Amino acid sequence: MAKKNVYFFGGGKADGNESMKNLLGGKGANLAEMAGHPDLHLPVPPGFTITTEVCTYYYKNGQKYPAGLKEEVAKALKKVEALMGKKFGDPGDPLLVSVRSGARKSMPGMMETVLNVGLTAKTIPGMIRQSGGNGRFVYDAYRRLITMYSDVVMEKGGGIEPKEDMGIRRQLERIMHDIKKKKGVALDVELTVDDLKTLCNAYKAKIKEVLGKEFPDDAMAQLWGGIGAVFASWNGKRAIAYRRIEGIPDEWGTAVNVQTMVFGNMGDDSATGVAFTRNPGNGDDHFYGEYLVNAQGEDVVAGIRTPAPINTVSQSDHNKDLKTLEGAMSGVYKELYGIQKRLERHYRDMQDIEFTIEKGRLFMLQCRVGKRNGPAAVKMALDMVKEKLISKEEAVLRVTPEQLDELLHPIIDPAEEKKNKPVGKGLPAGPGAAAGRIVFTSADAMRWAKESKQVILVREETNPEDIDGMRAAAAILTARGGMTSHAALVARGWGKCCVVGCSAIEIDLGARTLRIGEAAVKEGDWVTLNGTKGLVYAGQLAMMDAAAENQDLNDFLKICDSIRALKIRTNADTPDDARKARGFGAEGIGLFRTEHMFYGKGSAQPLFLLRKMIMSSSVEERRRALEELFPFMKKDMKGTLEAMDGLPVTIRLLDPPLHEFVPHQKEQREQLAASLNISLEELEKRANLLQESNPMMGHRGVRLGVTYPEVSETQFRAILEAAAELIKDGKKVYPEIMIPVVGEVKELEDQLVIAKRVYAEVLKKSGLKKIDHMFGTMIEIPRAALVADKIAEVASFFSFGTNDLTQMTFGYSRDDIGGFLQDYLEKGILPDDPFQSIDIEGVGELITMGITRGRKTNKNLKVGICGEHGGDPRSIAFCYKAGMNYVSCSPFRVPIARLAAARAVLADRPAKKKTRKK
Ligand code: ADP
Ligand code: MG
Ligand code: MG
């Protein structure tokens, strides 16, 4: 049998179901599920879905349809006609359909839909008769068809690229605008049937003039035109740009849904709306949505009229005077409320639904898992576990690391926010806060962002063409649109700070200026947004971090902790960072860099002493300098060991090449010379001797300890004495001493001899019987991974230093990769920046080999990672699979790592599902 290309749904039956998203697209699969699943049988207008495979075929075969498609479509259409008792293209009682796109994943507003297909000179009179003489409605539907068809099918589908603001849709909208102005009306619902007839004729003339073709007056031609245009829209510019950003493969293709039209524009007992089964902005368990009376399709999201709230919990400042659906049509509202409850139970997740009410009758047009921002994702996941709707494992899979990141985003410092009065208020469409310089176009946003300027994109309302600029901006602010407008939808998906529908805004695009209430602002001026409350402030307000007090966040992370196997440590160099990281849940320090004490606050004296040590030319000189340095080192170690209270602290010995510390200013050099009792010339001579032509591969790390054993010795002593003193104070400590830049076991053995001697001396001096500690190494040189079996005989732990390991495996200098990385990414030579996400194929292979070989000779070998990658979710998943014991990342990434580590476990074993509740 030939492959099935068309799947029917309607009348309580469906060929497909929800599990067939790949084939039917998200929209088609869910339409089938809503129509056909015995638990649902919802009122879905009948129709059929042409599969994504047809789209793939179409592009593979020079834009031709597979054989037999026409016949299959005709057969499915017959079935729809039989159910509806109407015929497509019939003058007596015509069936109208919509042609809707629908890929696997929703791509909001990226692809195309045409409504009211089948209206022609032949069918219009019949349509008017069937609607009880409602000519106004029929011509309203007709002008919408002409607009959508000319835009989607004739222009975009025809590959025509109009000049800025000269697209056919814009041109038709201008005609509409002129007619409204001439008639002195503000809204399109105020136009009469004769106005609409005039409008349709003017539209058709304009189309002929601009596009050089007639608008087709044949139902079948319209249908196939629509189908072709949906397929064409898959390769439209906007859709391609969106796929790049979202990482959606080109091969997926889109499905086409052809569906019986129902009409929300038949009068005041008709309406159309969109809703969420829970609030997607904060996760509250309230049915939440907007609707418009006497409207069709995109009117709700287009921002032409202000949509009304469906119920009182959906009210905002912005729409509180409008009548709720609950108040206006209580019976239909009740039915809708019941349906959304059933849908959420059925799908066991928050649903985003589209509905239309035709003369008091409710129809369901779409449902899908609703996008939500981070705070809402966490709250819903927690609530649904409490409601026993989902399992803990599923809850963990419901929150992405990116969403969790939003909860860790800065908010405006509350004290600062209290002092300032907002200049405008809109709807809270994207969480957190952001400050930036305002720009007015997507292109400007991209240009400024390229220059590393933080910008806020301000638009009347956004549309899919703004997508790149929205991405580049730190936040988005619009004058119009509701919580389901394009800007809100996109920002929510990305977790970007966003305020929409700020009606106090007046934009003068030409002058690049803006009025917000009283305030006048121009391009480049600073504005601060509170996306959680929908507030706009003039100027740049101070930000702060909100994560610590968030109970939901902590509860959710506890669930993650109950699932993950990897320990999460942090990279911290100061007691302060250590405490912060423990607050975020860190279970140890994976990297404490000794050299940190020579940078920043309070570093002047230790740095001076270090320099003295570096400039010493004899062992005696060096020992003297080290003795002076010793108390500083010990104090530094003590602070952090104490802050971690018995949790392991991996302390890395001095790593960077010494000449990095040599002062450049003459004055400092003179001071140094004086303290060493040598001349400036002598000092400069010694400094020059330290110069290396390739310092990153030069005299650094363990190599320093081999050449200057006293340097290592002092550090060992500082660590162990710090530990001893704390133990004697009744504190718990666990230092792990780590030697960097090792490539050969003998290097490590050389150092271990010193460490053992110092340990014995410290025990003797302190009178302690033992100090729990470990001695291990960083694996950051490819050779170390290769000879890991030998190294593991000496080392008790490995910590993969993936920054250097990546650098040396690829031979890319970390500091210079910027010069060519972009080209490598654009040409697809590298999939990602290997310094951000582990190169699993190459560097990952070395890691796996290192772990396997190391554990062969030392089965208790503890293994972790301390490079940048330790905070990257994809890399964390890899580390788990590779068999590491822990990952270590910066304090702020610790919560994300906790989640990523739990998800890594679940990626390996399928989550237990709660059984479906009826
Ligand atoms: P998108 O994928 O951009 O959301 P849709 O295919 O969902 O596009 O169509 C947009 C809107 O058009 C829907 O929300 C719905 O209001 C309207 N629509 C689509 N098909 C029909 C139909 N058969 N009857 C009535 N309205 C429809
Ligand atoms: Mg839709
Ligand atoms: Mg290193």
Image (cartoon, rainbow, N blue to C red):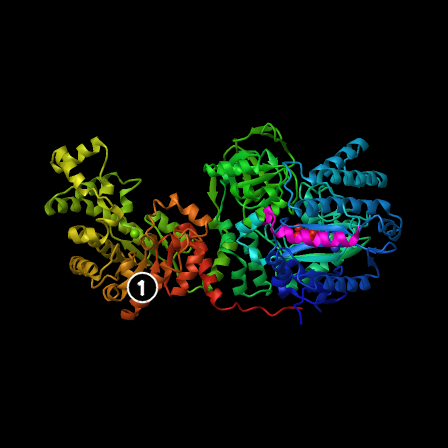
Q: Position of residue 491 (x, y in %)?
A: 57, 46
Residue 770 visible, this orientation:
yes
Q: Is residue 223 magenta?
A: yes
Q: Position of residue 202 (x, y in %)?
A: 79, 38
Q: Can you name the residue that lies furthest to the bottom here?
A: 1
Query: Residue 180 versus residue 504: which sits nearer the camera?
Result: 180
Query: Which region shows up in magenta?
Result: 218-239
Q: Residue at x 24, y 58 (%)?
A: 743
Does residue 851 appear left or right of residue 398 in this picture? left
Q: Is residue 88 magenta?
A: no
Quadrant where the C terminus sits is bottom right
Does residue 478 appear left or right of residue 800 in this picture? right
Quadrant where the N terminus sits is bottom right
Residue 348 visible, this orientation:
no
Task: Tell me the kind of residue under disc 1.
Answer: Gly
Q: Is residue 402 above or below residue 30?
A: above
Q: Is residue 858 above or below residue 409?
A: below
Does residue 18 appear left or right of residue 811 in this picture? right
Q: Residues within 10 Å of mark 1 (few under 14, many from 20)?
A: many
Look at the magenta stretch and give its main secondary structure. Answer: helix
Counting every numbered tag in the picture gives 1
Q: Position of residue 240 (x, y in %)?
A: 57, 49
Q: In which quarter of the view is residue 38 placed?
A: bottom right
Q: Secondary structure at mark 1?
A: helix
Q: Position of residue 4 (x, y in %)?
A: 67, 67
Residue occupied by mark 1: 850
Q: Residue at x 24, y 41 (%)?
A: 661
| Beta carbon at label 1 within 8 Å of ligand 3 | no
